[in-house]
Image: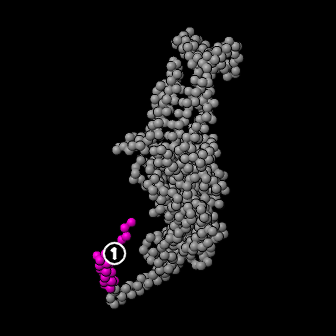
Amino acid sequence: MEEKKLDINSIIGFVLIFGILIFMFYQNQPTPEELEAQKAKQEQVEAEAKKVEEEAQKPAVKETQTINLKDSTAVAAYKSGVGAFGFSAVSDGTTKLENEVLYLEVSNKGGQIVEATMKNYVTYDSVPVYLVKDGNANFALNFTTSDNRVLNTADLYFEPSLSKSGDNQVLSMKAKVADNQFLEYRYEMRPNEYLVDFTIRSQGLNGVLNSSKPVTLEWELKGIRHSKSVKYENRYTRLTYNHDGDNISKLSENSELDEETEEDVKWMSYRQHFFSSILATDDHFETAQLSSKNLVEEESKDILFTKEYSTKAPLKLQGGELSQHMHWYYGPTDVKILDDYKDLGLVESIPFGWGIFGWINRHVFTPFYGFLSSFLPFGIAIIVMTILVRLALSPVTYKSYLSQAKMKVLKPEITEINEKYKDNAMKKQQETMKLYNKAGVSPMSGCIPALLQLPIFYALFMFFPTSFALRQKSFLWADDLSSYDVVLNLPFAIPFYGDHVSLFPILASVAIFFYMQMTTGESMQMQQQPGMPNMKFIMYLSPIMMLFFFNNYASGLSLYYFISNLITILIMLVIKNYILDQDKIHAQIQENKSKPKKENKFQRKMREMMEQAEQQKKSGKR
């Protein structure tokens, strides 16, 4: 590297700059007249502040009135050393709390968190992940004083005091009436944790607070966009809450405004897809009014916020004082992290799915993929997991294909029945059922294996878009397996498709087309039964729907379906060519026909009902 040296022009330039600065300094020195004017102005400000203080100390009128501290007179009173409600004044400013993973800024005004930043994560465009920033959140208490003034703590100034408790950082924010009379917000941050203990308490305010009127906690937040597809991110952005004995509920995903009032609320989570802002309390809120407003109508790069959340919950006074022990969680919606707080149950805020589907996702796929991805590249881990899942389901695939093979053997006889009774649908149905019963074949045996696979498919459908382990993990051309892959950006947007082309959904659609051709192609050769759907139409419609639907979904999910269908096709080819023997199946069916078949109760009931219907039909014709 070439060494830089000062030349004569640089030296002259620095000398000129230094001379100009000295000249400006002396030019800006105030004259004696200006000094005298400044002194008079200062005395005038102090006189006005004293007058405001005297007015504040006068007895208040006994009626409810709301004080707006944005008023210049009230602000002047704060700056002069006395708050409009008798609370001491503190200058503007913030106090920082940070550990290895989380950065917080707490404002003197309101004593609330005004910035929450994830240290180890960035958004899709490499900006730090903020959960609180630039006034998108507000936390305050509303209460009434003994002289019926309505107080909002967002307008009060708190005095900060930062200390240590072992390795923990402790920030005490006090809005003081006097040294022994104050409202305190206490934050305690532990090393390497996203959970911050938060306590609200008061001391000596039992004569200041109006115990006949509730103290209301208000928490509002607008979710900041983090992903390139705001509509996809918004689909997994929800207000989730624990209530009534560990019941988990969610507000609407798409409603313009959804509101609920619940009892015995333990925590509320303002989830922003892969990151969450959670307020949990040790002493449950007796009631809470929760609301969620959708801010996203269409896909746009200009949208900054996804949803607007709000919670209002009354706090109990104990002996006329406040004492509420809570916790703030600002961090990833990651099962590995949230599972550490089992006593609070925060892991339930993750959308695993409902019922058996959620259980499979939570206790099978999530830990299994976590194990595979601990030693394999993330895309390869998806492929390996897909192969193992398909192998585990191969017996079900075998049963399904065996049923198809049996139906194929019976195809000539079914065709003959259809021709013989083409004008009598009831008789055709009766004879077809008799044939199935004699041959020992059930037309439902092909559907049942497919139904058994539904919990697996749905659990995986919920796993890929919500698995934090996949976030911003690349594979082949996909730079983020938790979002869509892009191989071509379009100069226009196609309705329901988007303004880009994703390759994994195309591959998945092609694979599912060939899979459906294998499974339904032979069925289509059989005569179409009345009332049955057009299988050829479904065979073409399903891949097209997948192509449009998955173009904006997680590329990891499309990769799974692509590999899954490829593996299924291979398994079916092996079953068809090396395991099943058409001649043996035919011989077995003929042997079953020759044996007397005993009807079960269901079959007998169905036969009797059909015979009765046939008799009624004949009677009607007479």
| Position in image of residue 134 (x %, y %) | 45, 63
Seen at 47% across and 80% down, the residue is 80
Question: In terms of image quadrants, where is residue 161?
Answer: bottom right
* Extent of the magenta region: 1-27
**Residue at screen point 49% across, 45% down:** 475
- Examine the rendered structure and indicate whether residue 523 appears above or below residue 168: above
Magenta-drawn stretch contains 25:
yes
> Looking at this view, is 69 or 166 the one in front?
166
Residue 439 against residue 334 in the figure, above or below: above
| Residue designated by label 1 | 6
Q: Is residue 163 above or below residue 414?
A: below
The amino acid marked with disc number 1 is Leu
Q: Residue 424: tell me if it is visible.
A: no
Query: Is residue 59 found inside the magenta-colored segment of the image?
Result: no
Residue 397 image offset from top left, x and y in percent: 60, 29
The picture places residue 147, in percent across and down from the top left corner, at: 55, 73
What residue sits 56% from the left and 9% below the top?
Answer: 622
Q: Residue at x 53, y 22 (%)?
A: 523
